[in-house]
Image (spheres, rainbow, N blue to C red):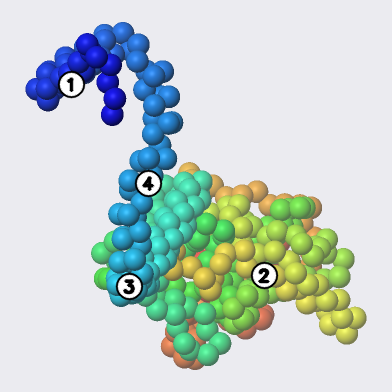
């Protein structure tokens, strides 16, 4: 390499360069910290040097990918197996939470319904469903120690389910409104017609008897408890008329109704203590109620059932006329 005479090029020593660059770096850092004046320069440099950063980290990324390719299958399989084992447990917990949420919603509806018709209400769990043929009874986990008494109404958040017929200290037996030995005085919401709903033994059907062809009753009519007899609170849904058959060869209409309460689906029921009224206070008779049945005695005579179960009423001659059920006391066990 040629050089001009009289000129001598001298390179600074390593120490000198170190000191110069150190001072320059400190100056730049102080300047950037105080005024943020190097932000644009730093942003531009980051764009310029980004490909260099990618190239610098490329060997490490390639090596990691190669290791994952060679030995990653076992780790991935192990992780998958762990997640697969946890999935059924998580799904089971989720189902339990959904069931609890549904149960809480059901209980809130029960208590909300009871507040309208009762001074006091207690939720009772269903322990057993009777398997006796042609009967509709359940056993609940509340008894005399909880204040339960015979004849006590049992409801759900949709309507009347039945009434308590046997009481033990820790549990009670409830006769549902579909039991063939059960009857309940009702009133048609549409026109005020008073009549009686009888159980049929079917799980989803009750019958309205002793009404003649001129009676004003239609499919779809809602039948609610009339409050006569004092066992069931007034105005609580009982059944909805689903079928009316007028056979000219029969003296009475064949009327079918479906219970409003969900008799076959509940896990809990509600025992209520109906709102008390003044002594001797009864609902006034409805003179517009059609006369649809032959005259009968005013009260039902109870007699033990053949199977020794729920007391049943006397034969048809002892059944009350719908317009004269005001004299009934304890109508809940007629047949």
Residue 236 falls left or right of residue 36:
right
Q: Disc 3 vs disc 4: which is toward the camera?
A: 4
> Residue 308 location, x and y as percent?
43, 88
**Residue under numbered circle 4:** 55
Instruction: Measure how far apart labels 3 and 1 are at the Cα level.
Output: 52 Å
Q: Which residue is drawn at 48% across and 89% down?
A: 132
Instruction: Measure how far apart labels 2 and 4 are at the Cα level.
Output: 79 Å
**Residue under numbered circle 1:** 11
Instruction: Measure how far apart labels 4 and 1 are at the Cα level.
Output: 33 Å
Is residue 150 positioned above or below 12 on the image? Answer: below
**Residue under numbered circle 2:** 258
Viewer-side residue, 56 vs 82:
56
Quarter that holds the N terminus: top left
Query: Circle 3 sits in a helix, a strand or a loop, which is it?
Result: helix
Q: Disc 1 vs disc 2: which is toward the camera?
A: 1
- Circle 4 residues within 10 Å: few <14, some 14–19, many ≥20: few
> Residue 16 location, x and y as percent?
12, 18
Instruction: Measure how far apart labels 2 and 3 are at the Cα level.
Output: 69 Å
Q: Disc 2 vs disc 4: which is toward the camera?
A: 4
- Circle 1 residues within 10 Å: few <14, some 14–19, many ≥20: few
């Amino acid at each position: 390499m040629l050089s001009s005479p009289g000129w001598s090029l001298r390179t600074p020593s390593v120490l000198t360069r170190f000191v110069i660059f150190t001072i320059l770096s400190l100056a730049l850092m102080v300047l950037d910290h105080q005024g943020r004046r190097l932000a644009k320069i730093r942003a531009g440099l980051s764009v310029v040097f980004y490909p260099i950063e990618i190239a610098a980290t490329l060997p490490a990324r390639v090596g990691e990918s190669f290791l994952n390719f060679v030995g990653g299958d076992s780790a991935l399989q192990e992780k998958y197996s762990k997640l697969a084992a946890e999935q059924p447990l998580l799904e089971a917990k989720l189902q339990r939470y959904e069931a609890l949420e549904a149960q809480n919603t059901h209980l809130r509806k029960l208590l909300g319904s009871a507040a309208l018709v009762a001074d006091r209400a207690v939720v009772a769990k269903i322990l057993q469903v009777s398997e006796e043929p042609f009967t509709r009874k359940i056993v609940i986990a509340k008894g005399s120690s909880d204040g339960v008494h015979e004849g006590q109404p049992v409801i759900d958040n949709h309507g009347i389910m039945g009434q308590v017929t046997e009481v033990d200290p820790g549990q009670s037996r409830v006769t549902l409104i579909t039991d063939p030995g059960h009857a309940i005085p009702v009133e048609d919401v549409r026109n005020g017609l008073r009549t009686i709903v009888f159980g049929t033994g079917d799980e989803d059907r009750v019958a309205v008897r002793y009404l003649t062809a001129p009676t004003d009753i239609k499919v779809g009519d809602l039948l609610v408890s009339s409050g006569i007899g004092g066992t069931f609170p007034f105005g609580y849904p009982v059944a909805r008329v689903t079928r009316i058959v007028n056979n000219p060869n029969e003296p009475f209409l064949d009327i079918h109704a479906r219970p409003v309460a969900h008799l076959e689906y509940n896990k809990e029921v509600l025992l209520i203590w109906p709102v008390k009224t003044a002594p001797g206070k009864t609902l006034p008779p409805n003179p517009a109620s059609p006369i649809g049945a032959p005259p009968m005695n005013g009260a039902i005579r109870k007699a033990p059932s053949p199977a020794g179960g729920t007391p049943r009423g006397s034969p048809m001659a002892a059944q009350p006329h719908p317009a004269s059920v005001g004299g009934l006391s304890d109508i809940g066990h007629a047949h």
